[in-house]
Amino acid sequence: MSKVKVASFGMSVDGFSAGPRQSLDDPLGVGGKSLMAWFFPTRTFQQMHGNGGGEIGIDDDFAARGFANVGAWILGRNMFGPIRGPWPDDSWKGWWGDEPPYRVPVFVLTHHARDSLVMRGGTTFNFVTDGIHAALDAAKKAAGDRDVRIGGGADTVRQYLRAGLVDEVHLALSPTLLGQGEALLAGIDLTGLGFKCTEHATSLHVMHVVLSK
Amino acid sequence: MSKVKVASFGMSVDGFSAGPRQSLDDPLGVGGKSLMAWFFPTRTFQQMHGNGGGEIGIDDDFAARGFANVGAWILGRNMFGPIRGPWPDDSWKGWWGDEPPYRVPVFVLTHHARDSLVMRGGTTFNFVTDGIHAALDAAKKAAGDRDVRIGGGADTVRQYLRAGLVDEVHLALSPTLLGQGEALLAGIDLTGLGFKCTEHATSLHVMHVVLSK
């Protein structure tokens, strides 16, 4: 059955999924990149970026699962880019170059309307200005019987969790401290929302946990 | 060198070190016992309670390290027992029976004075009414060149962390959700306090991380 999922989402020991002060140089905030240190060497990531090789094993299994059967993505504005407020022009097309790794329709939450962007390789960025429910409806329609993946950032994941719209969350708990940043789960009663930890596996790098209803 | 440490402290994926509603039946709050599921089977725990056997391996290594070289403990009032407010009488002597597993002086933080309790096996419970610094001074004096272990609960650990008085924290990150309870690290900037994650190891049950300065 089609589901709404969060996958390969890094979290530090102190509960942050991004560091403070996101910028062009630090898309995940200061120190945030360390949360994805398990992900970058995987075969899945390497192939996504046109490279050969890459590591296989537990980390790659989870990385690959996150991309399997995904028919549409939802991204928050900050995950799409560092620009805040109205779009000054159409030049910013995401962090990922001309051929983003999504290869399906992507719905970007924003308060500022913008025309869709058709990218190389199957990715279309669609800008949704009427809220998280509207974005999810559009994403589900685009995905058909495949899954919708909430790509992030942390605040977007929190909004969808709080609204009870997420079926499954895969977190990679990283042995790092960020000290400050965006707390992913603070103040969200996941048990009250019906989640349990249904799976866990540990690699040399992280502990993977799957939370589902 | 003598240090102040927190050890074998369980934390859920959602950041809680105890569940809600601590009681005589649930010393760690509702669901909190699941955080220590890695600890109970270890040889260290089994021997502490006079049993033979028990599992060895990563979990036991960390459990044993937590008890090594400890010359004194500090416990919060709630970790000592479920009674709140003035002591009604002297009948409550901790959760651990006549022969508690500490076997060294233990300093219990409380607002309500009480005479020391000399227990079997070397444990003395001393009740400290003049705050965390006074308790630490007394514990350091009692420990000599051995370490002081902050036993918990979560609020006591938070107070000592915030005051910058802790040198090392070993957490066991458990693949469980509690939903509510006592958040261990929320609002504490560990990086700002000088901590780094200096060690990690994963067992089938948990990911162990050591945070130190």
Image (cartoon, coloured by chain):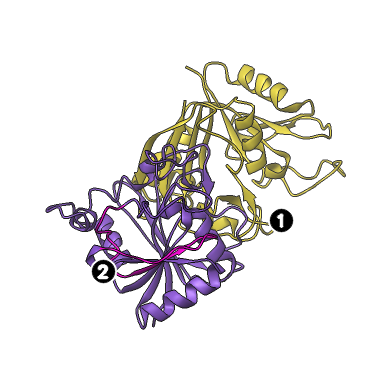
Chain colours: A yellow, B purple
Numbered tag placed on residue A125 in the rendering: none
- Identity of the residue drawn at 63% across and 31% down: A162
In the rendered image, the residue lying farthest to the front is B89
The magenta span reads B96-119
Q: Which residue is mark 1?
A: A24
- Identity of the residue drawn at 60% across and 44% down: A186
Q: Amino acid at mark 2?
A: Gly
Residue B108 coordinates in the image, percent (x, y): 44, 63
Towards the viewer: A166 or B146: B146
Towards the viewer: B7 or B131: B131
Residue B116 on the magenta span: yes
Q: Residues within 10 Å of mark 1 (few under 14, many from 20)?
A: few
Distance Cα–Cα, label 2 vs label 1: 59 Å
Residue B190 coordinates in the image, percent (x, y): 57, 63
Residue A84 coordinates in the image, percent (x, y): 81, 46
Residue B206 on the magenta span: no
Q: Is residue B203 left or right of residue B192?
A: left
Q: Secondary structure at mark 1?
A: loop
- Look at the magenta stretch and give its main secondary structure: loop
Residue A49 appears in the figure? no
Towards the viewer: A195 or A60: A195
Residue B195 appears in the figure? yes
* Subunit bearing disc 1: A
Q: Is residue B34 above or below residue A162?
A: below
Q: Of the residues tagged 2 and 1, which is closer to the observer?
A: 2
Q: Secondary structure at mark 2?
A: helix
In the rendered image, the residue lying farthest to the left is B52
- Identity of the residue drawn at 83% across and 31% down: A113
Q: Is residue A115 left or right of residue A108?
A: right
Q: Which residue is mark 2?
A: B122
